[in-house]
């Protein structure tokens, strides 16, 4: 028997797998499943971006690029960061094949065995997996008693952050809750990070999908944060480019220099022509982004109203395309039942560290969302 490394024994396969397997089995048997478990926009990639990718291929941009990204894309990213009040120079940026790879490189660069990472529950599943792969210990702050807001949980955070804290992970808008953290909440994180000399990772991948006025504050733009913030962003959600695999990290130059070693020895670079398409996305795609955001906004409002009609109050999410539906205590059983009986696929909250909820994605048409809610109601799941 092959002996595998300890690190792979510390993590589980993706928790959404069980649900998608069940959905596939049902579909293979001819069932029509309303899939509200997906983590990707249901829109095509904007045409101008697709065309830019094709043109780049035709122009022969098919070889390796500089490891941390092509200069045109790094320049466009630096400008985008500057719009968010973040002054990252081009040697403070790594272009990665997907935001996930960027996060992985940051975790591996900052964390050792026994390092301490702080996560807010509910948290996107991969943070925990990456922390465990690095051998780090996880401290958690539960936001579910506060309708997923961070501000009322700052006292709890103060109890968890200490001089032993190496990394605090902030994800706003949040996957899975859709919460957008207030400026006061971000300032609270800043004060603790400064007091205890901790690095903060701000995962802003859902930044363009918010329903509040204006773009949410970027954590690294707060006074005192630029030298201790890693900002993660990407193209998957904003431009509906999940399969293109393109993301980016902004961080202080010394951190980027260390992370670049992992980057260059693992992926070498992000795909050449995809990076060229990324330049087009950043520079010329505002209208498509607004259209997608408006569609998500309408669906969110519609879903909240539909659930309210069935007597279900759902904490109102201000961003991303997810919401957390309060369900039975045994959320895994609820989700399994919902898919088997109502043919509606959702993800158990316990996968994100918050039992008692199901995560619903509204990256689906209004018609399918209505169908999903009525099936849940008809089958006694609301
Ligand atoms: N961060 C969060 C919170 C996400 O939900 C995701 C994708 O689901 C990612 C990062 C990574 O996305 P990608 O690797 O497609 O850029």
Image: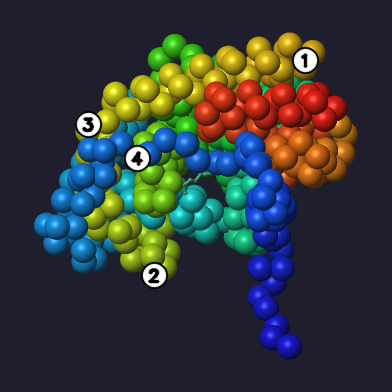
Callout 2 crowding tier (Cα within 10 Å): few <14, some 14–19, many ≥20: few
Sequence order check, earlier mark of 4 and 1: 4
Q: Which residue is mark 1?
A: 310
Q: Residue at the bottom extreme?
A: 1
Q: Which residue is mark 4?
A: 45
- Mark 2–mark 4 distance (CA, rounded to whole Å): 30 Å
Sequence order check, earlier mark of 3 and 4: 4
Q: Which residue is mark 2?
A: 265
Q: Is residue 377 above or below residue 133?
A: above
- Mark 2–mark 3 distance (CA, rounded to whole Å): 33 Å
Residue at image x 73%, y 11%?
A: 309
Residue at image x 42%, y 42%?
A: 236
Q: Residue at the front extreme?
A: 30
In this picture, residue 132 sits left or right of residue 79: right
Callout 1 crowding tier (Cα within 10 Å): few <14, some 14–19, many ≥20: few
CB of residue at label 1: within 8 Å of ligand 1? no
> Which type of secondary structure does the marked residue at label 3 adopt?
helix
**Residue 315 falls in which quadrant of the image?**
top right
Dot in front, 1 or 2: 1
Residue at image x 62%, y 40%?
A: 35
Residue at image x 60%, y 60%?
A: 134
Q: Position of residue 317 (x, y in %)?
A: 60, 21
Q: Which residue is mark 3?
A: 284
Q: Position of residue 283 (x, y in %)?
A: 22, 33
Q: Position of residue 99 (x, y in %)?
A: 44, 47
Q: Is residue 290 above or below residue 24?
A: above
Dot in front, 2 or 4: 4
- Mark 4–mark 1 distance (CA, rounded to whole Å): 35 Å
In this picture, residue 172 sits left or right of residue 117: left
């Amino acid at each position: 028997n092959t002996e595998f490394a300890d690190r792979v024994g510390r993590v589980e396969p993706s928790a959404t797998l069980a649900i998608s397997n069940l959905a596939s089995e049902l579909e293979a048997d001819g069932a029509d499943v309303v899939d509200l478990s997906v983590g990707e926009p249901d829109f095509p990639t904007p045409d101008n971006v697709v065309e830019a990718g094709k043109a780049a291929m035709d122009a022969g941009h098919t070889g390796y690029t500089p490891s941390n990204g092509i200069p045109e894309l790094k320049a466009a990213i630096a400008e985008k960061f500057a719009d968010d009040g973040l002054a990252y120079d081009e040697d403070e940026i790594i272009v990665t094949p997907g935001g996930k790879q960027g996060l992985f490189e940051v975790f591996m660069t900052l964390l050792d065995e026994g390092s301490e990472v702080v996560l807010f529950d509910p948290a996107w599943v991969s943070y925990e997996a990456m922390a465990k792969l690095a051998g780090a210990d996880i401290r958690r702050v539960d936001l579910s008693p506060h309708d997923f807001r961070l501000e009322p949980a700052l006292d709890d955070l103060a109890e968890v952050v200490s001089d032993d804290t190496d990394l605090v992970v902030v994800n706003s808008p949040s996957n899975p809750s859709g919460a957008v953290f207030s400026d006061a909440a971000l300032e609270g994180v800043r004060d603790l990070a400064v007091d205890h000399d901790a690095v903060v990772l701000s995962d802003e991948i859902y930044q363009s999908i918010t329903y509040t006025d204006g773009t949410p504050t970027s954590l690294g733009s707060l006074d005192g944060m630029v030298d201790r913030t890693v900002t993660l962003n990407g193209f998957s959600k904003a431009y509906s480019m999940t399969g293109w695999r393109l993301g980016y990290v902004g961080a202080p130059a010394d951190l980027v220099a260390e992370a670049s070693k992992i980057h260059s020895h693992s992926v070498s670079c992000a795909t050449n022509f995809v990076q060229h398409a990324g330049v087009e996305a950043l520079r010329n795609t505002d209208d498509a982004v607004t259209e997608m955001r408006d569609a998500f906004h309408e669906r969110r409002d519609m879903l909240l109203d539909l659930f309210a009609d069935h007597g279900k109050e759902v904490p109102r999410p201000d961003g991303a395309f997810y919401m957390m539906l309060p369900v039975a205590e045994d959320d895994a059983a609820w989700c399994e039942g919902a898919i088997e009986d109502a043919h509606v696929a959702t993800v158990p909250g316990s996968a994100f560290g918050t039992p008692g909820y199901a995560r619903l994605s509204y990256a689906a048409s209004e018609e399918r969302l209505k169908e999903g809610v009525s099936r849940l109601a008809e089958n006694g799941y609301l």
